[in-house]
Image (cartoon, helix red, strand yellow):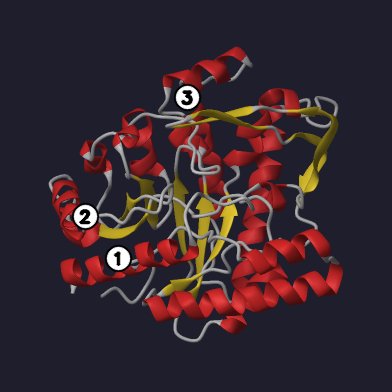
Amino acid sequence: MRTSPPFRADHVGSLLRPSALLRARNGLSGEALREAEDAAIRQVVRRQEETGLQSATDGEFRRASWHMDFIYRLGGIGQATDENITVRFHNERGDIEFTPAALRVHDRIKLNEPVFADDFTYLRDTVTTAVPKLTIPSPSMVHYRGGPAAIDPKVYPDVEEFWRDLSAAYAEQVRRIGALGCTYLQFDDTSLAYLNDPAQRAELSERGDDAEHMHLRYIKQINAALAAKPAGMTITTHMCRGNFRSSWAAAGGYDFVAEALFGELKVDGFFLEYDDERSGGFEPLRFVPPGKMVVLGLVTTKHGELESKDTLKRRIDEAAKFIDLDQLCLSPQCGFSSTVEGNELTADQQFAKLALIVETAQEVWG
């Protein structure tokens, strides 16, 4: 068993919101809502630990969205009051649309205060056996959502200044969260997975981005944000192709970004979506250097049907043809509730999947 993250049995972060918490979000505010969130988080932390997980999150219970709750708390970024964007998601029944407000970079980007600081300290003080894990969106997500049109040219006439300020704000976030005792931090990044999809790259090209090299820019900026990470902090990144109400937005293996991503991104581990054919094969894992961990997201969060333990073991063996088995771990392919709505399964099914991951990891790695 590994004693430092990522762990042999791990998970991405978000968990289904209990019905009582959903009711509280609709009817309470301020301290009353926070007390309801505190109670729900205490319960879900205990459940994670009882399941045998070595890491625990707060389920992202205080957020409406896995990424925008963070991004809007960065200084200089706000919602556009008169414009929405449309993200089209797919499932076996058809398509659904997510239409959040567009974001605007209206001032110089800075970190006014560490984001989710109180949320992390509550989690830190609540866990008993598990390592507290904080998840935040990567710097890439600030740019991928809106592209060049979201950046006020009067604020940033030189786009290089935008990138410098963005990475500097993230670097300060990493430093200050580390000072609070965070030793396990995850950058969630759909963009680096989306870029494997030719249709997504075509959309970026149409809006004026250099889609063929965008992943290199994102890798560079994430590395700048991590350049001075605190000693003893493990930082991973999670990449998936969209997760909204059991639906997905992009498809394609990791081949397009793999060599640069695995060879150059200075994280300690990669959480990779691998629950179905949309994610491609394991061949890109040959680019992962020694010492880096890969967490195979073989268990889907998009439906409640429980995977076969034998199938999971077979797929781990397949991945081990391209990367040393000792560099591998196991997890769900994504969170269970990337937005407050959650995916289409029950809490019991969610924890059955997490228990399956723990049991399988114990049998594979001991």
Asked whether the residues under the numbered discs 1 and 2 touch, taking CB atoms below 8 Å apart as contact, a structural biologist would say yes
Question: How much space separates mark 1 and mark 2, taking CA atoms?
Answer: 10 Å
The residue under the point 18% across, 52% down is 311
The front one of 236 and 80 is: 80
Residue 301 screen position, x and y as percent: 42, 51
Residue 213, label in figure: 3
Residue 320 screen position, x and y as percent: 16, 51
Residue 114 visible here: no
Which residue in the rendered view is the most extreme toward the top?
206
Is 169 situated left or right of 277 in this image? right
User: For numbered disc 3, what is the local secondary structure?
Assistant: loop
Q: Where does label 1 land, which residue?
A: 356
Question: How much space separates mark 3 and mark 2, taking CA atoms?
Answer: 34 Å
Q: Amino acid at mark 3?
A: His
The image shows a total of numbered marks equal to 3
Q: Amino acid at mark 1?
A: Leu
Q: Where does label 2 land, which residue?
A: 312
